[in-house]
Amino acid sequence: MLNVTPFLLFDGNCAEAMTFYQNCLGGELTLTKVSDTPMKVQYPSEKYNRIIYAQLKNGAIDISATDWLHPTRMPKQGNTVAIHISGNSEDVKTVFDKLSEGAPKELLDELREMPFGSYGHLADKYGVHWFFKGDKKE
């Protein structure tokens, strides 16, 4: 089963923004800093306090977010809101492969295994950004 949620990208103020949304919408907020993950070795220490993943859940409300961490792409209007698809890695790959048809190669990050499961990103041929997270392999 796949889950689809809005995915927001912030430039260093993800924790502040998601706390604000929690105050407005209620629910449970989970914030994971870069420094709290094995992935911290991939980032300079000045990025350790950035949020690598945030999730706000309250009933039907489910919003995911992160601080901007891509080393070469910069945040600008149009690329800070995306769609997040998560679920079974096989189902996630199927959707990723279909949406990647015609996607610009410079905005395509192939699915790859990470400590938390598979991860990938693309902007489709219409310019819509998609993030993907498959279940962690046991």
Image (tube, rainbow, N blue to C red):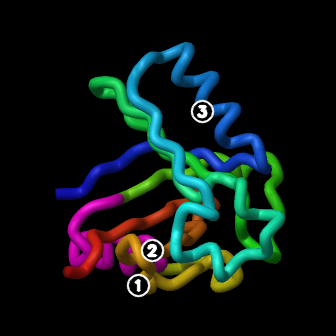
Callout 3–callout 2 Cβ contact below 8 Å:
no
Quadrant in the rendering for residue 107: bottom right
Residue at 70 percent across and 32 percent down: it is 16
Question: Within 10 angstroms of label 1, few (less than 14), some, or many (20 or more) residues?
Answer: some
Against 108, residue 20 (above or below) is above
- Looking at the rendering, the stretch of residues picked out in magenta corresponds to 86-100
Callout 1–callout 2 Cβ contact below 8 Å:
yes
Q: Earlier in the sequence, mark 3 or mark 2?
A: 3
User: Which numbered dot is residue 18?
Assistant: 3
Q: Which residue is denoted by mark 2 in the rendering?
A: 119
- Judge left or right: residue 42 versus residue 121: right
Q: Position of residue 22 (x, y in %)?
A: 52, 23
Type of amino acid under label 3:
Met
Q: Is residue 99 magenta?
A: yes
Q: Earlier in the sequence, mark 1 or mark 2?
A: 1
Quadrant in the rendering for residue 24: top right
Q: Earlier in the sequence, mark 3 or mark 1?
A: 3
Q: Secondary structure at mark 1?
A: strand
Q: CA distance from mark 3 to mark 1?
A: 27 Å
Residue at 71 percent across and 62 percent down: it is 48
Q: Say which of 64 and 13 sits in front.
A: 13
Type of amino acid under label 2:
Tyr
Q: CA distance from mark 3 to mark 2?
A: 22 Å
